[in-house]
Amino acid sequence: MDYDVVVIGGGAAGLSGAVALARSLRSVLVVDAGEPRNAPAAGVHNYLGREGVPPAELFAAGRAEAEAYGVEFVRDRVRSLAPGFRVELSDRTVTARKLLVTTGLTDELPEVPGLAERWGEDVLHCPYCHGYEVRGRAIGVLSTGNGMHQALLFAQLSDDVTLFLHTGDEPTAEEWEQLAARGIAVVDGEVTGLRVEADRLTGVRLASGRVVDRDVLVVAPRFTANDGVLAGLGLAAEPVEMMGRVMGSHVPANPTGATAVAGVYVAGNLADVSAQVVVSAAAGMRAGAMINAELVMEETRAAVERRRVFSAASEREVQALVAGTRDL
């Protein structure tokens, strides 16, 4: 094999797994296309000791740490994976004993013009990722299913929250009461666009032509697993539900990251759509440790078998020598 482990994806999960493996003296190749999901974000939050660090800076530091332990990197996309863990790159094919796949997910935004251009700036989705940074501002929540959860979470951060029903469900009687109790305004009608002035969001435009002043718009993307590379191994993403609704897809794995295909591990958002950067890093490290443990046991079984074969051969030689001596 060319490598003990090939890691596909160089984000927090992939880098953490690579470091854990390299510190156990494993040969590791990381294949990374260089397109992290959180590239539009100004900073990473809730990462103890690295609060607010720009994503590119965090990943550069992680790569430097991994390279210091001997991890190899290649900026490329995996063209295909084949049984035997043959990893086809653009200019060569390498083999590995194990695979750690950390290709993450794609945020599929609601079909409203302008959302993609403001994504990660003043169009957001996670109160824990960026909520503190927009505290106290005029926040809108775009409902495409049930926007109650996000509306209530962001009401913790601002007294000026408006729920746009858009294409979402009509609130139940209980939900209307909750909205009123938390002082959350509700606007009916479909959202058709944004008002942007001086490179910042200033309002949400409705189909009626009305514009509601807002500084921030919260949306609920569909979290779609980047699982295409796993097709050659017979693995595929499955729907994942949150609060009774399909919110996207993920590749199922046990708590260690092991999938249904022996020797293939997943970590980060590919396996857990809700994982923030620090959680993805922890999952990658744990998967790396489990891969190393699996390799150690395989190597130990092979060593025991070699010892038994050698011992049996030595015993036969001794017996032959003793028999020859008697003949003399």
Image (tube, helix red, strand yellow):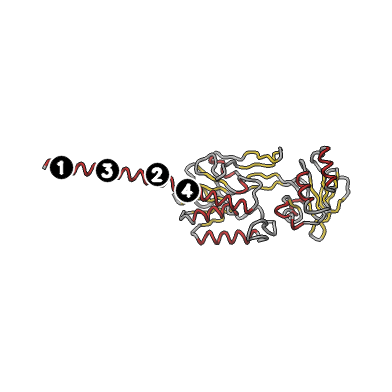
Marks 1/4: CA–CA distance: 46 Å
For residue 233, side relative to residue 176 (left or right): left
Query: Element at badge 2?
Result: helix
Residue, x 82% and y 58% (percent of image)?
A: 197
Going from N to C along the chain, the mark reached first, 1 or 3, is: 3
Q: Where is mark 4, residue-wise?
A: 293
Question: What is the total number of numbered labels drawn onto the structure image?
Answer: 4
Q: Position of residue 326 (x, y in %)?
A: 13, 41
Q: Where is mark 2, residue-wise?
A: 301
Mark 3 Cα within 10 Å, few/some/many (few <14, many 20+)? few
In this rendered view, identify the residue nearer to me: 148 or 266: 148
For residue 156, side relative to residue 26 (left or right): right
Q: Where is mark 1, residue-wise?
A: 324
Going from N to C along the chain, the mark reached first, 2 or 1, is: 2
Going from N to C along the chain, the mark reached first, 2 or 3, is: 2
Type of amino acid at the residue the image marks with label 4: Ala
Marks 2/1: CA–CA distance: 35 Å
Q: Is residue 199 above or below residue 114?
A: below
Mark 4 Cα within 10 Å, few/some/many (few <14, many 20+)? some
Query: Element at badge 1?
Result: helix
Marks 2/4: CA–CA distance: 12 Å
Q: Position of residue 61 (x, y in %)?
A: 58, 61
Contact flag, marks 2 and 4 (Cβ < 8 Å) = no
Q: Position of residue 53 (x, y in %)?
A: 66, 61
Q: Position of residue 5 (x, y in %)?
A: 49, 50
Q: Where is mark 3, residue-wise?
A: 313
Type of amino acid at the residue the image marks with label 1: Gly
Going from N to C along the chain, the mark reached first, 2 or 4, is: 4
Going from N to C along the chain, the mark reached first, 4 or 3, is: 4
